[in-house]
Image (cartoon, rainbow, N blue to C red):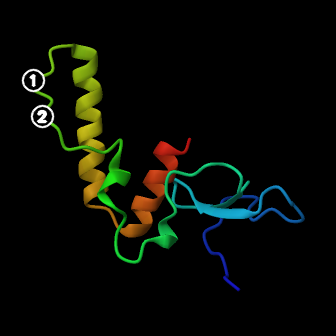
Amino acid sequence: MVDLVDCEDGHPLKNDDVQDCVVLDSSRMWRTVDCRRPFPALCELYPEKPPDDILRGFTDVDCESIKNNAKKIICVRQKKLYEIYKNSSRADKCALENGIFGE
């Protein structure tokens, strides 16, 4: 049995057969969700750290060579996310992966 702390308001839901999984969301709060929903990361299965390919949206790239201004802005934002992700704890990485890739 696991005691949940820092649950999002209204969670865990009581008597709900559909919301039968618990996730750490991007605000670092626990909440219940439907287990049939696809999730990009299952952090509890990683004994050490998530594999590098989980960083699909978090890449360390050179944005200077991008000519298109809109694409360059997106690249700079992703680069900032990569730096945040790279320096995050395991719990924060899990929340980022599920919050950004899962929503």
Q: Which residue is mark 1?
A: 65
Give the Cα distance between marks 1 and 2.
Answer: 7 Å
Residue at the (29%, 37%) spot, across then down: 78
Q: Which residue is mark 2?
A: 62
Frontmost residue, 8 versus 92: 92
Q: Quadrant of the N terminus?
A: bottom right
Kindly identify which numbered label has been placed on residue 18: none
Residue at the (80%, 62%) spot, across then down: 13
Residue at the (33%, 50%) spot, across then down: 55
Residue at the (28%, 16%) spot, across then down: 70
Horizontal arrangement in the rendering, residue 60 relative to residue 52 (left or right)? left
Disc 2 crowd, CA 10 A, few/some/many (<14, 14-19, 20+): few
Q: Are marks 1 and 2 in contact (CB under 8 Å)?
A: yes
Give how far across and how far down residue 63 sits, in percent: 15, 29
Frontmost residue, 17 versus 14: 17
In what element is the residue under mark 2? loop
Give how far across and how far down residue 102 sits, in percent: 54, 45
